[in-house]
């Protein structure tokens, strides 16, 4: 199962997780890694090991898709792009990661944030 | 032409060939080939008894051609060529048929096909050898003198080795002194000897060696000729101070009004326009920085020995040498390109060579480690390894020495500031030299240095002038914020071999600009152009001991060539049929080695330069150039022989 997920992640992202040498640059530059229980470099590690438990890797939803890590990754593993692929896998099943009905104070959220949210969190 | 009497020797290579190729069948079929009078197979043809089979058969069977069907010429051409010669036959009347790499190894799943292919390969070799002409090696004279470019520890070592063997050396250094980067270092890993103490005696030795002619402030601008016979032109920039007269009294320096950043201290101090890089410089004399000198003449007035001449002009010197050693060294990767670390923006973010200068007792602070912003003591220090190295966005390769010198830096810091805190960000610790792992262990064990496996995301300065270093510890997975007084970047090594010089020397460069050796393992100091050798960091990142080893290797390679007294070259080269040549010059423009020139309107091949690549033969529109033993006619016969079964 994980092998199949792995294959899809590589296919969608076009990146090679095996190139990761666990330097941690991605985690260091990530503006929200402090809010992640599993950090960007650790997510890449689990993917590299083909131990892809989507429940465990849920910090991909914390990811802002700012791509700071993509800018700095010294091996062009580009975690941000890989996380995008993982999110896509879930969203393509029709499982949205956010429930619009539960959003509060919609009118107070900056439009950009709302657009980014729906782009990233919904299929 | 005498009748062909060819012997074919078929090797089993243990089971490597015999396990796939049906040797019996090959022997039978090869016996039927035209010109073949003798066929022998053996389990290991390259062994002593195997070689004897060849030598004896040549004599006994009066063979005038030999084919060895075995592995590849790159592995055993020479082995069998010697056996052939021992039998009294010219080595060019022998060919190898590669039936291992080209057949048994690649077709192990198809025994029949592999056997058939082996027979065809042998048939081709038999057809070729029967038309091969016996050739003699080409010989040429050698000028017994060597040019060494670059006066760092690599160039100095090579020059001294050669000079001590009695060979005259021309040493060309572009800065005012020899010594290179090693002169800037404080102490050196893994033994912590002081760099100056082991370097300056060597520099003095270079200076007084009767066999070494030293040109400082000089560059090689032109190289002509070929192996054994190079003519070089050296541009000598004006020093404006006569090194024979200068007594280094420093009166001139005191009166000079022009101040510029001192490159020897990597900008951490200022120097005058008339300067000596460091007190032990060789030659031991001041030099004028012509770019910044305003020619005010104050120094001329105070010089007690009248050593200064502001009108000195540059000079062009010509020298003839037999071999060239390139030892132009390295530089640090520009720190400004690592924007996230604030190098060039914050005074307290420095590079590793600047830190060496801070550690050096002859450095800008007399060896005191201080904050460059305000001269205050340093308590917390952060080192960042792989700054630029192992990074696809900067230098994809490992610079090899930074792990070790960073450990050294940490140790020397802790010796000076025992209650200080050291943090080293690293990805991997690479300490694979003799005594290196022990050195790292000592730093951890005795000095309690915090090695943090992770990277730094950014550095900024807070209101108190402390650097805030934010990074990740990948082992705990936690974010780290360290307040530091000084941050030292272990910047990667880049080669200093400019493309222009490399092109003139015909030294190929790899994708990063390092000089490309012929073979990384077996021929590490030779480059594709015969007679040119490389040594030191210009060939790849290296520490001092490796640099010195390589420099001695380059010197001994040059020595080998020079002591032999003449150069011998493979005679399998191009030959011009002067009656056919129409003087179109196409070959001249196509030859990658500049081996062809026009003499009396017709092409002429310089036998000592031609590498026998055959580009000219393919390009000649009137078929006037032929590669010896690779004529069109020969190749056609080979193709026919291969196809005719
Ligand atoms: C911070 C730091 C610390 C280090 N510490 C250690 C240590 O503790 N132990 C250790 O073993 N190694 C150490 N090293 C490595 C050491 O510096 C190198 O191994 C060594 O200097 C390489 O010598 P080289 O002669 O090849 O090059 P260089 O020292 O760079 O010398 C090259 C010389 O060639 C000259 N040159 C360049 N171009 C031309 C040209 N076109 N024409 C004429 N001349 C030219 C240059 O001016 C220079 O004099 C350290 C390196 C760094 C950066
Ligand atoms: S920055 Fe790239 S190489 Fe480094 S840990 Fe993250 S994904 Fe791996
Ligand atoms: S793209 Fe995601 S994981 Fe990468 S730095 Fe931005 S937020 Fe962090």
Image (cartoon, coloured by chain):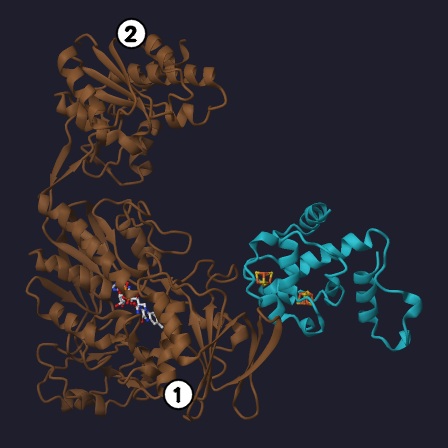
- Tell me which residue sits at (13%, 68%) in the image: B206
Q: Which x, y percent locates residue B554?
A: 21, 53
How far is the residue under mark 2 from the one under mark 1?
85 Å
- Which colour denotes chain A? cyan
Report whether B600 appears left or right of B619. Answer: left
Report whether B513 appears left or right of B236. Answer: right
| Label 1 near ligand 1 (CB < 8 Å) | no
The residue to which callout 1 is attached is B418
* Badge 2 density bin: few <14, some 14–19, many ≥20, Cα 10 Å: some
Q: Chain of mark 2?
A: B
| Total tally of numbered discs in the picture | 2
Q: Secondary structure at mark 2?
A: loop
Quarter that holds the N terminus of chain B = top left
Which label sits on residue B34?
Answer: 2
Query: In the rendered image of this protein, does residue B106 appear above or below residue B229?
Result: above
Query: In the rendered image of this protein, does residue B54 appear above or below residue B383?
Result: above
Q: Which x, y percent locates residue B569?
A: 18, 36
| Label 2 near ligand 1 (CB < 8 Å) | no
Q: Secondary structure at mark 1?
A: loop
Q: Quadrant of residue B119?
A: top left
Q: Which x, y percent locates residue B65?
A: 21, 16
Residue B595 vs residue B36, the one in the foreground: B36
Picture quadrant of ligand 1: bottom left
Residue B301 in view in this figure: yes
Residue that protrudes farthest toward the right in the picture: A101
Q: Chain of mark 1?
A: B
Report whether B355 appears left or right of B561. Answer: right
Residue that protrudes farthest toward the front in the picture: B445
What chain is colored brown? B
Residue B150 in view in this figure: no
């Amino acid at each position: 199962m994980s092998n199949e997920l792995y294959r899809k992640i590589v296919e969608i992202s076009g990146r090679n997780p095996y190139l990761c040498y666990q330097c941690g640059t991605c985690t260091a530059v990530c503006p929200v890694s402090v809010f992640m229980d599993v950090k960007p470099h650790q997510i890449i590690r689990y993917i590299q090991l083909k131990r892809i438990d989507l429940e465990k890797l849920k910090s991909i939803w914390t990811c802002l898709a700012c791509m700071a890590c993509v800018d700095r990754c010294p091996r062009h593993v580009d975690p941000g792009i890989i996380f995008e692929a993982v999110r896509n896998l879930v969203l393509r099943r029709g499982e949205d990661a956010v429930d619009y009905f539960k959003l509060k104070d919609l009118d107070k959220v900056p439009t950009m944030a709302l657009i980014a949210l729906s782009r990233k969190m919904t299929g | 032409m005498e009748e062909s009497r060819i012997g074919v020797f078929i090797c089993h290579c243990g089971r490597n060939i015999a396990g796939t190729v049906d040797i019996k069948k090959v022997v039978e079929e090869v016996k039927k080939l035209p010109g073949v009078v003798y066929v022998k197979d053996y389990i290991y043809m390259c062994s002593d008894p195997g070689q004897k089979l060849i030598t004896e058969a040549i004599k006994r069977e009066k063979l005038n051609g030999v084919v060895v069907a075995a592995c590849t010429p790159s592995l055993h051409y020479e082995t069998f060529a010697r056996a052939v010669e021992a039998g009294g036959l010219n080595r060019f009347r022998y060919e190898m048929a590669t039936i291992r790499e080209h057949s048994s190894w690649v077709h192990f799943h198809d025994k029949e096909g592999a056997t058939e292919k082996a027979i065809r390969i042998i048939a081709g070799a038999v057809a070729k050898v029967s038309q091969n002409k016996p050739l003699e090696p080409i010989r040429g004279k050698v000028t017994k003198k060597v040019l060494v470019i670059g006066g760092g520890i690599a160039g100095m070592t090579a020059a001294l080795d050669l000079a001590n063997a009695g060979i005259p050396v021309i040493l060309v250094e572009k800065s005012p002194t020899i010594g290179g980067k090693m002169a800037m270092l404080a102490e050196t890993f893994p033994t912590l000897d002081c760099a100056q103490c082991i370097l300056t005696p060597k520099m003095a030795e270079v200076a007084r060696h009767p066999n070494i002619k030293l040109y400082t402030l000089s560059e090689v601008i032109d190289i002509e000729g070929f192996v054994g016979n190079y003519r070089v032109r050296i541009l000598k920039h004006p020093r404006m101070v006569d090194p024979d007269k200068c007594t280094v009294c420093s009166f001139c320096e005191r009166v000079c009004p022009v101040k510029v950043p001192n490159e020897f201290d990597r900008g951490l101090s200022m120097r005058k326009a008339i300067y000596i890089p460091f007190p032990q410089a060789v030659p031991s004399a001041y030099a004028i920085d012509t770019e910044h000198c305003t020619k005010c003449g104050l120094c001329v007035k105070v010089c007690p020995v009248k050593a200064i001449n502001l009108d000195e002009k540059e000079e062009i010197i010509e020298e003839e040498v037999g071999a060239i050693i390139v030892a132009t060294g390295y530089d640090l990767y520009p720190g400004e390109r690592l924007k996230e670390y604030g190098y060039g923006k914050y005074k307290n973010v420095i590079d590793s060579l600047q830190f060496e200068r801070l550690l050096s007792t002859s450095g800008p602070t007399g060896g005191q480690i201080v904050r460059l912003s305000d001269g205050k003591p340093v308590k917390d220090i952060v080192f960042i390894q792989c700054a630029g190295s192992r990074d696809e966005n900067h230098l994809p390769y490992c610079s090899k020495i930074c792990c070790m010198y960073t450990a050294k830096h940490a140790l020397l810091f802790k010796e000076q500031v025992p209650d200080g805190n050291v943090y080293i960000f690293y990805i991997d610790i690479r300490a694979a030299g003799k005594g290196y792992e022990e050195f790292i262990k000592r730093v951890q064990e005795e000095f309690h240095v915090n090695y943090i496996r992770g990277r730094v995301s950014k550095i900024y300065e807070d209101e108190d002038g402390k650097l805030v270093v934010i990074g990740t510890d990948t082992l705990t997975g936690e974010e780290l914020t360290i307040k530091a007084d000084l941050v030292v970047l272990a910047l990667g090594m880049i080669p200093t071999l400019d493309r222009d010089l490399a092109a003139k020397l015909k030294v190929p460069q790899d994708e990063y600009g390092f000089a490309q050796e012929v073979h990384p393992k077996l021929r590490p100091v030779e480059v594709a152009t015969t007679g040119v050798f490389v040594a030191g960091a210009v060939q790849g990142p290296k520490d001092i001991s490796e640099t010195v080893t390589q420099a001695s290797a380059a010197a001994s390679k040059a020595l080998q060539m020079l002591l032999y007294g003449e150069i011998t070259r493979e005679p399998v080269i191009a030959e011009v049929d002067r009656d056919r040549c129409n003087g179109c010059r196409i070959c001249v423009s196509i030859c990658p080695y500049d081996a062809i020139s026009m003499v009396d309107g017709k092409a002429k091949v310089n036998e000592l330069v031609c590498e026998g690549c055959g580009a000219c033969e393919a390009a000649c529109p009137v078929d006037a150039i032929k590669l010896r033993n690779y004529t069109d006619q020969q190749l056609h016969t080979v193709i026919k022989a291969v196809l005719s079964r």
